[in-house]
Image: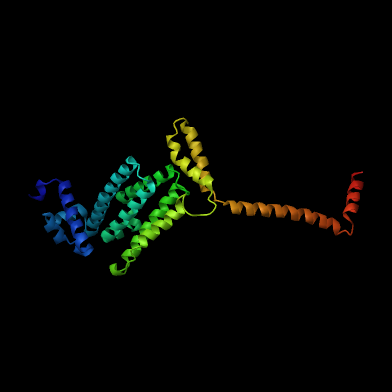
Amino acid sequence: MSDEARSRAEVRASIVEAAAWLLRSGGPGAVTTRGVAERAGIQAPTIYRLFGDKDGLLEAVAEHVMATFVAEKVAEVAAAASAEVDPVDDLRNSWHRQIEFGLANPAVFRMLSDPERVLGSTATHRGRQVLEMRVHRLAAAGRLRVPEPRAVDLIHAAGVGTVQSLLATPPELRDSSLADAMMETVLGRILTDAPVPALDESVVAAVALRALTPSLGMLSDAERRVLIQWLDRITAAPSETAEERATADDRAAAAGNTTSVREEGMIAGTGESTETAGSLRSAAVR
């Protein structure tokens, strides 16, 4: 079938699929105009007409591969929510899938880790939204001790860093426990049941209520907006442990005592007794 007899979308899809196969099997160097044209069954000039150059084709391939993966993740998170899978278990499973994807598609991962490419990647933005959905489930279950955006940033940064570190290490030297260790480190920072001392429970409660606020139908839109503002203020404030509050109280009490002693010292510095000072005060009043 000639290029003219096939729709533009069909031709484009066949080129992207062919290039994706070559990219997986041989890396960016294997994605040649001739190789893609032969595998897709099209004429080489068609590639330039649709994608401009090789870089344009590689970007389209990376977006296609990522979009396919993200579509699977969307289905997974919906199924997990429907089956009421524990949100922590769901996050762990998603984490392992993400690490496996990055290691299996190093060229795509590196391309979409480029800050300039990320800004224009619809699939990457959609992938972050899926992560936000998973984190929201944690918040709604009362499991988060940090604001949702903070948890998303920590998980995302840890995931990208883990894959980059593993890809930079020869396969035979990679630490197979690195991904698990990083996940547990992040969970220890964001979860309420993490082994941390003197957790500020007000922040935990605020994060959980913040996640549920949009569904509070007994409140008006204006009331929900105000409530969200209050809750965001609580979660954004620096947390203070019970020990830190006690220490601050002790300092305040000590400061008060110091002031009293200083006042008495000033009186004593006159060479007069406290009783004499009292007499002078009485005389002044008279």
- Specify whether 26 is left or right of 241: left
Q: Residue at x 32, y 40 (%)?
A: 82
**Which of the 4 image quarters holds residue 154?**
bottom left
Q: Evaluate whether residue 119 shows in this view.
A: no
Judge left or right: residue 190 versus residue 274.
Answer: left
Task: Identify the residue at image location x=24%, y=51%.
Answer: 64
Q: Residue at x 89, y 52 (%)?
A: 275
Task: Say how many tags the image has.
Answer: 0
| Residue 250 appears in the rendering | yes
Q: Where is residue 156 in the image (x, y as percent from the top left)?
A: 38, 54
- Vertically, is 72 above or below 21? above
- At x 50%, y 33%, the residue is 223
Residue 262 drawn at (x, y percent)? 78, 56
Image height of 93 relative to 177, above or below: above
Residue found at the very far left of the displayed protein: 1
Q: Nearer the viewer, residue 38 or 268?
A: 268
**Relative to 145, is 264 on the left or the right?**
right
Q: Which colour scheme is used?
A: rainbow
Query: Is 68 left, or right, of 46 in this rendering?
Result: right
Compare residues 71 and 57 and report the one nearer the observer.
71
